[in-house]
Amino acid sequence: MVQKYQSPVRVYKHPFELVMAAYERRFPTCHLIPMFVASDVVDEETSEDGSTHKIERRCALDVDAPRLLKRIAGVDYVYFIQKNTLNRKERTLHIESHNETFSNRVIINETCCYSVHPENEDWTCFEQNASLDIKSFFGFESTVEKVAMKQYASSIKKGKEIIEYYLKELEDEGVTHVPRWAPPSLSLPELMEFLSPLLSSPLLSSPLLSSPLLSSPLLSSPADKLDADYIKRYLGDLTPLQESCLIRLRKWLQETHKGKIPKDEHILRFLRARDFNMDKAREILCQSLTWRKQHQVDYLLETWSSPQVLQDYYTGGWHHHDRDGRPLYILRLGQMDTKGLVRALGEESLLRHVLSINEEGLRRCEENTKVFGRPISCWTCLVDLEGLNMRHLWRPGVKALLRIIEVVEANYPETLGRLLILRAPRVFPVLWTLVSPFIDENTRKKFLIYAGNDYQGTGGLVDYIDKEIIPDFLGGECMCEVPEGGLVPKSMYRTAEELENEDVRLWTETIYQCASIFKGAPHELLIEIIDASSVITWDFDVCKGDVVFNIYHSKRAPQLPRKDPLGAHGITSPGGNNVQLIDKSWTLGQDYSMVESPLTCKEGESVQGSHITRWPGFYILQWKFHNMPSCSATNLPRVDDVLATLQVSSHKCKVMYYTEVLGSEDFRLVSTLMLNGCLSTCKHSSTCTFSPYPVSCIYIFLYSSICTSPSDFAYSAHAISFFFAF
């Protein structure tokens, strides 16, 4: 397995030339790096004008490996080849290194780059990435991998300290400035000869040269990269390998989710939840992002309003912060009528309320990070169990609690910093036995349980919460606004039918649908188009497996499948949300045609797109198992294909999708309005200016005038937004 490392952007608040002077002091040996024994110059080259300097070194390292391993390998030192290219004109230094020793068994590659900070030319940036691939090593592959990564992580940590040390040494010697490189002086005839091609160029008279778009160099946005100072300030102290995992996962999300990625704190929580195993963290993070998108959780704080019953009888609320600056949430569970709340509201309303609490907690963590000037990524929860009795063990209530815990654990990992359980009664061990198996082991370690009044003494509540903010009902002086609760009146109870109907309306109301794809059984969606030039839009996430997305057109309508297409064979369909429309007897190119090139989509990707129809008829959107042979190329009937692939769990994919069709009249109206608006602007202004608003927003605004209801606008605006985002 190839181990990879990618560093954040490390910033030296010194000019590039001064940093280069400090860097050169590391050679031929460096007493700050004991393992760096020696280095010899193998080749050196300088350009005629002195702007470029290339040097190749052979470096010897005394690796801190077990003595037995060194004896088996038969070497005392490990040799590396390092090639440096210093461009004084561009103010960059590129470093490439690879191992010479055991190169047929172990492949180590490293690239580093020093460059000028994109926002401050007197600062210098440093980036580093490396890969380690151990093919074979006398049966000690795992040991060598651990030793190599340990040594590399140690050297990374010292890297910046060493440069800072030599910068301080230069300062002590009185060297605080190194002049920039300048080209050799030219005579006037030589200068005119050099500039003549530029002076005669027609580009000089072009208005493009005065455009503000050309006034700044083409640099990658600093927001696309993480620098070490930002990580330390907002995310906390991470090891070099942990930083690498964060940067690589963040980069993968940018590539697969078109830049629409969660905040760095959120990504880091999932990495911590899986001990920085990038593959495992990526899997659960993608599942959570799909869940958030499907249920519109990102807009929960704006759209969810707690019913009056919750405001009166839900005994929980936010209350200042603990000694570490974490937001403090207080839950008086013993005073809560869980049975009454479940009977009056239903499980889904309680779940949504708890999700809104977690979303509010994330927001408060961000605020406290700014207020206290240090990373705060989790909160403290204080649970008062006074009044807890067998009434709280009502089975539907416990069931609702377990489901809520399951959802929160899956989508809000590492958000609970500490859980203080106070005044635990005798019945608590019974409840704890039921609940604890559903709580992650790392989370359970954060629990502190106090029986009776033990929380009032040394080692109790005052160790975690300032005395001034201890709530009055716990013997403190601070008034707490958490409701006192009480029994929910039975007159507010709802019937089972009412709760069931409302649960469906509350929680499953989503514009997205889910579908399963099997090897030999694609999922197909039929869209009938009456008018040509209509626009089919789509937005889908690949939740599991890799799929191929196709769009077909047919003049004839496919036969719609029965509700249970496999029922006649006595077989249960592999997925109730798997629909197949293209008849096996149809021939591609005769009965139906492909109107878009196939698009291969990897697991975890989020895909948006659109297609302007050229003909009326029937369009079929198809999601197919990746690398699956076409149905016409196999002699097995489709049902047999499904049966064969049901034996292999890996032959299943899952997508979550949303599609919409914009009618040709609506599309023309929007286009006409947009065109007229542009023409009107040009008539009244001699200078063309760009709108500060995205084009998609303008189209949504215009399209709102042709929607007949709020729901029409909500769905149509969603489609237009991602259609015109391109």
Image (spheres, rainbow, N blue to C red):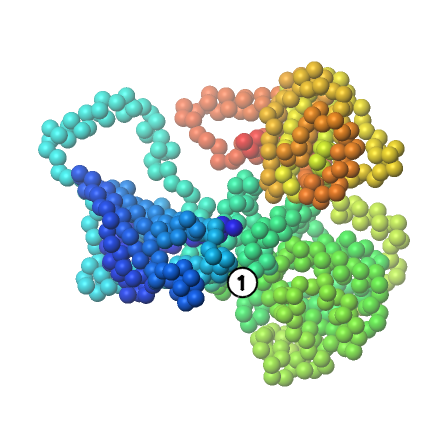
Residue extending furthest toward the bottom: 457
User: Residue 330 location in percent, x, y?
Assistant: 67, 68
Residue under label 1? 376
Residue at image coords 73%, 65%: 437
* Secondary structure category for the residue under label 1: loop
Q: Is residue 610 left or right of residue 710?
A: left
Q: Residue at x 76, y 29 (%)?
A: 636
Using the image as rendered, state which of residue 157 and residue 690 is in the foreground.
157
Viewer-closest of 551 and 652? 652
The x, y position of residue 153, in whole percent, is: 43, 60
Q: Position of residue 35 (x, y in %)?
A: 34, 63
Viewer can see residue 341: no
Residue ID at (13%, 30%): 190
Residue that appears at 61% across and 43% down: 604
Horizontal arrangement in the rendering, residue 381 relative to residue 98 (left or right):
right
Asked which quadrant contains residue 25, the reply is bottom left
Point out the image quarter for the C terminus.
top right
616 relative position to 77: left or right: right
